[in-house]
Image (spheres, helix red, strand yellow):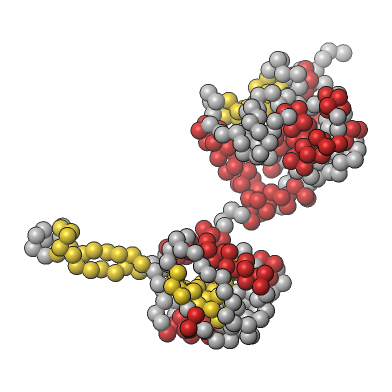
């Protein structure tokens, strides 16, 4: 019987048909047949600023179709986990194995026997589903150099960026690789978003799906970015005449106008008894983020506003951690105070442990711990509640 002719397009078509998530990633990668590579491998090409999949046709052609798809997904996972350009370790061989173990936890039964699997062979004491870093440390502590040297590897990692230490991110990426990484991140983000909407992931495991959603959907818009946008859009203009600027319409006849954009922002901090010291410390930690963005008035409250303890926090200055109240919770108290003092925006940091308040005369934003948001039904019209 004549040897079958290898056609990568056939397997890429199968990927497109059966693996919606991986098909997005595949579009970002050049596929190149290279007989100098024993099996296959991924690398970054500086001259083209593209990621490449190198494969040995003879090796790939010797595998059944299911394992070919498994090998392709294995290589794509190296890029998804950013193994090629970012995370490096001193012991290159051990890091290669660790990276493979982290990936192959999600490809059980889809790869050739030469692949490394947690719970099998020399790795029988290592559980599945751990990170590359975890496996790296476990191999160093549990296996001898001879055992490591005897491990065969599914793919080649020789053209990954060189190791510079045992700290993630030690290696500095080139401008080209940063651009390629950015494009790849965008593709992964779009893949996760689209697959989440259609609930079509192919053979992506539930554990991996949850990790990807947490990283690319949950974190796509950080609450800090929303907070920054909220503050920026709350600004108002103040105009003052100044002779130091030339009036463009009537030069040297009338003074020009000097425009200063400011925002009068109130941050009401819930210090009721339901907010324990640990949660209050978390609140102050997150408030420090706001102090790096804008000036604001810090307003402590429980069932009332403690007006004697209201402080003006200047941009770039630290916030003093202090508990001044321990009573119940009433959102009407800070709402009334803010309405009466002509603020442009109102941010409420709270555990949401009170009924919905009355109408706010300015834009209002709620910030609460995510663990609290998971079991509360708090709603305040169309106002946004951000989780921290």
Report the side of 264 relative to 268 (left or right): left
Please state which of residues 312 and 333 is positioned toward the viewer in this rendering.
Answer: 312
Work out whether 320 lies above or below 94. Answer: below
Residue 50 placement: quadrant: top right
Work out whether 287 lies above or below 340. Answer: above
Q: Position of residue 357 (x, y in %)?
A: 56, 83
- Give the total of numbered labels: 0
Q: Quadrant of the N terminus?
A: top right
Farthest-out residue, top: 2
Please state which of residues 367 and 202 is positioned toward the viewer in this rendering.
Answer: 367
Residue at 80 percent across and 45 percent down: it is 129
Residue at 87 percent across and 27 percent down: it is 147
Q: Quadrant of the C terminus?
A: bottom right
Work out whether 270 lies above or below 145. Answer: below
Please state which of residues 22 and 147 is positioned toward the viewer in this rendering.
Answer: 147
Does the rendering let one see residue 20?
yes
Q: Position of residue 49 (x, y in %)?
A: 54, 29
Residue at 77 percent across and 37 percent down: it is 136
Q: Position of residue 344 (x, y in %)?
A: 41, 73
Please state which of residues 275 and 239 is positioned toward the viewer in this rendering.
Answer: 275
Work out whether 59 lies above or below 305. Answer: above
Residue at 76 percent across and 18 percent down: it is 38
Residue 72 placement: quadrant: top right
Residue 361 placement: quadrant: bottom left
Does the rendering let one see residue 151?
no
């Amino acid at each position: 019987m004549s040897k079958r002719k290898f056609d990568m397009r056939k397997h890429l078509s199968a990927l497109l048909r059966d693996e919606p998530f991986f098909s997005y990633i595949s579009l970002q990668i050049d596929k190149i047949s290279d007989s100098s590579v024993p099996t296959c491998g991924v690398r970054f090409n500086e001259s083209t600023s593209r990621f490449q999949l190198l494969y040995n046709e003879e090796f790939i052609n010797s595998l059944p179709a299911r394992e070919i798809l498994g090998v392709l997904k294995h290589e794509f996972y190296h890029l998804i986990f950013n193994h090629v350009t970012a995370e490096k370790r001193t012991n290159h061989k051990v890091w290669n194995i660790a990276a493979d173990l982290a990936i192959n936890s999600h490809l059980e039964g889809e790869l050739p026997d030469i692949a490394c699997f947690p719970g099998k062979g020399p790795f029988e004491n290592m559980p599945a589903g751990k990170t590359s870093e975890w496996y790296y440390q476990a191999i160093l502590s549990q296996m001898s150099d001879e055992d490591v040297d005897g491990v065969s590897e599914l793919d080649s990692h020789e053209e990954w960026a060189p190791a510079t230490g045992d700290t993630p991110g030690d290696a500095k990426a080139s401008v080209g690789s940063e651009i390629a990484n950015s494009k790849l991140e965008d593709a992964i983000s779009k893949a996760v978003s689209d697959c989440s909407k259609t609930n079509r992931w192919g053979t992506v495991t539930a554990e991996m799906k949850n990790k990807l959603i947490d990283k690319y959907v949950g974190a796509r818009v950080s609450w800090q970015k929303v907070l920054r946008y909220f503050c920026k859009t709350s600004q108002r203009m103040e105009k003052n005449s100044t002779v130091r600027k030339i009036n463009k319409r009537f030069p040297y006849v009338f003074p020009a106008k000097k425009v200063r954009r400011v925002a009068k922002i109130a941050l009401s901090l819930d210090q009721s008894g339901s907010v324990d010291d640990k949660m209050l410390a978390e609140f102050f930690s997150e408030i420090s983020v706001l102090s790096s963005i804008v000036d604001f008035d810090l307003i402590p409250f429980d069932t009332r506003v403690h007006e004697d303890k209201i402080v003006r926090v200047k941009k770039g200055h630290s916030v003093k951690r202090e508990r001044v109240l321990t009573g119940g919770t009433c959102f009407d108290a800070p709402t009334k105070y803010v309405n009466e003092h002509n603020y442009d925006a109102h941010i409420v940091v709270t555990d949401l442990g009170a009924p919905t308040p009355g109408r706010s005369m300015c834009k209002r934003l709620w910030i609460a711990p995510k663990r609290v948001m998971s079991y509360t039904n708090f709603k305040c019209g169309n106002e946004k509640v951000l989780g921290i």
